[in-house]
Image: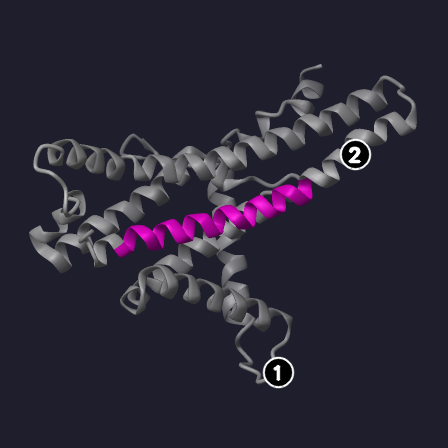
Amino acid sequence: MAASGNAIDPIHQFEIQRIIPLKIFGVDASFTNSSLFMVIILAAISILMLYGTRARSVVPGRLQSAAEMAYEFVASTVRSTAGEHGMKFFPFVFTLFMFVLFSNVIGLIPYTFTVTSQIAVTFALAALVILTVIVYGFYKNGIHFLNLFVPSGVSPILLPFLVLIEVISFVSRPISLSIRLFANMLAGHITLKVFAGFVVMLIGAGAWAPLATLPVAAIVLLTAFELLVAVLQAYVFAILTCVYLNDAIHPGH
């Protein structure tokens, strides 16, 4: 009964499981299923970008075309959002985009683990983005980086309130950036698992075959939608990163 419950439990798929238990100075540093899929994601990206572009053919093959499309897509996103000055951050944005994209897409494969369904992972990525913005903002602009929080052409009476709003908005960026990605992946996978549970229960109850096919059709449609969401969320994460980096490059309003 417990095994059957786990088979249709929509939350069970997000459980962190230790593969190699390890403690370093009392800190749990175990190699988990999340760690394993991060390694798989890194390997998949490396194969695409290194193996796929090794030939550098004038007429590219499938892997080279995919690698070049990903490269040009992110490069155009950075240029259009942060300008030519933002291209110095292209490796950073490209790495984030590819990691989030592969995490989302690989997580759609049955019996895999969705790394971006963990708030700890998405918040770490978002915190890295905001920390980069703050460090580079002060490095490039010094104290003038604080102009980011001071809108121009505002009445002195309203200025303190608007500065407070700007500060709150800036502080909330890593929260919104991480929760948006985490919530979309979590909700989509839970929905897929629930509909899969409906199929199992209908078949187990000896339901009429056409009735059992309804949830199957819904799963097919939801999977296609989830694939779209997986790509879209990687794009949203990348373009918001570019927007935030643009604030560090040009902090004035």
Disc count in the image?
2
Q: Quadrant of residue 86?
A: bottom left
Give the residue drawn at x 60%, y 47%: 228
Q: Is 141 drawn above or below residue 63 in the view shown? A: above
Q: Residues within 10 Å of mark 2 (few under 14, many from 20)?
A: some
Residues in magenta? 223-246
Q: Is residue 93 left or right of residue 248?
A: right
Q: Is residue 240 magenta?
A: yes
Give the residue drawn at x 56%, y 81%: 55
Q: Is residue 192 visible?
A: yes
Give residue 68's position: percent from left, percent from top: 52, 71
Give the residue drawn at x 71%, y 20%: 4
- Reading the image, the residue beneath label 1 is 59
Q: Is residue 106 visible?
A: no
Query: Mark 2 belongs to which amino acid?
Result: Val
Give residue 183's position: percent from left, percent from top: 48, 33
Give the residue drawn at x 28%, y 56%: 246
Q: Dividing the image into 4 quarters, which one contains the N terminus?
A: top right
**Under tag 2, what secondary structure?**
helix
Marks 1 and 2 sit apart, C-alpha to C-alpha, by 40 Å
